Each structure stands twice: as structure tokens, then as C-alpha cells.
Amino acid sequence: MEPTVITVENTINAPVARVWEAWTNPEHITKWSFASDDWHTPYAYNDIRTGGKFKSTMAAKDGSMSFDFEGIYSNVEEHKLIEYAMADGRKVKISFTDQGDSTKVVESFDAENTNPIEMQQGGWQAILDNFKKYTETLL
């Protein structure tokens, strides 16, 4: 059975080079990769190349819960495309469309079977919204 694919998107008011840097640099990832203010990402590692690995730890700020988000890149085209498989085998595709002073980011991912589709979409959209807010404040 084919997995359900969920898509989230946003237009970031920043040039693609800055958007790419904020998306891929672990120093930046730790500042935006969480869905709500009571969570944070204390650790991030990223080897952004085809065949490279990534891992970030997402944790509740009160210490009650944490999990690792990790995978292996299957295709990386700088400033354009990132594709990877998560540790559980689900696939993700992120496209970056250069629109001059802005960049459209479209992220599609295979849904998991535990949580409702709407909840998964909401969580990933919230992270993408955090990314937009953070990236637009960078100089």
C-alpha cells in the first residue's frame, strides 16, 4: 500500500542562499526546528550531501520527553532540492524555488500510521512557520 503523502509549504522573504544556509547549518537548525515554544532542538548534526546523514534531537523544555529525528540523504542539489529517508524508511522531499528576494519551500513527506494526518500536517507546518520566522530575522 502506498503511503499517504502530506505537503506543507511557505514562502520565505529571503534569498535562496540564506534560506538554504538556515535550513542546512546545524547552528541554525537548533534555533527553529520545533513545533511549539515548549520544545527545542538542543542538538543537530548535518552532513548535507547525497549519502550524508543528519540527526537532530527534539526535546520538551521541561525534560519530560525527547526524540531523535534522523535519516540519510538520497539526493541533494544545492539551493534546489533535498530528498531523504527517515530512520523508519519514510521519504521526504523538499524543494527550494528561487523567487529573487523570496524563496518558496515545499516539503512533502510520507505520513506515519500513529497520528492523524491533520496532526502530522499541523506539526510539520508549525516547524516550517518557525523556520520562516527565524530565517526572515537573519541579516
Image (spheres, rainbow, N blue to C red):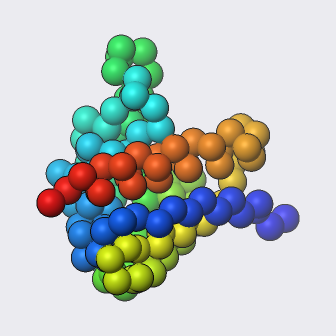
The x, y position of residue 45, in whole percent, is 24, 54
Please give the name of the residue rendered at 84% of the width and 64% of the height, measured from the top-left corner.
1
The x, y position of residue 99, in whole percent, is 41, 82
Vertical placement of 86 versus 120: above or below?
below
In the rendered structure, the answer to whether residue 93 lies left or right of residue 37 reads: right
Please give the name of the residue rendered at 25% of the width and 35% of the height, measured from the top-left corner.
42
Between 46 and 104, the one nearer to me in the picture: 104
In the rendered structure, the answer to whether residue 136 lies left or right of residue 72 reads: left
**Image quarter for residue 57?**
top left
Residue 90 visible, this orientation: no
Between 139 and 86, the one nearer to me in the picture: 139
Between 102 and 86, the one nearer to me in the picture: 102
Q: How many marks?
A: 0
**Image quarter for residue 90?**
bottom right
Please give the name of the residue rendered at 31% of the width and 38% of the height, measured from the top-left corner.
41
Vertical placement of 5 versus 119: above or below?
below
Vertical placement of 100 versus 136: above or below?
below
Residue 4 visible, this orientation: yes
The x, y position of residue 44, in whole percent, is 26, 48
Please give the name of the residue rendered at 73% of the width and 43% of the height, measured from the top-left corner.
118
In the rendered structure, the answer to whether residue 24 lies left or right of residue 121 reads: left
**Image quarter for residue 71?**
bottom left
Q: Quadrant of the C terminus?
A: bottom left
The x, y position of residue 34, in whole percent, is 41, 39
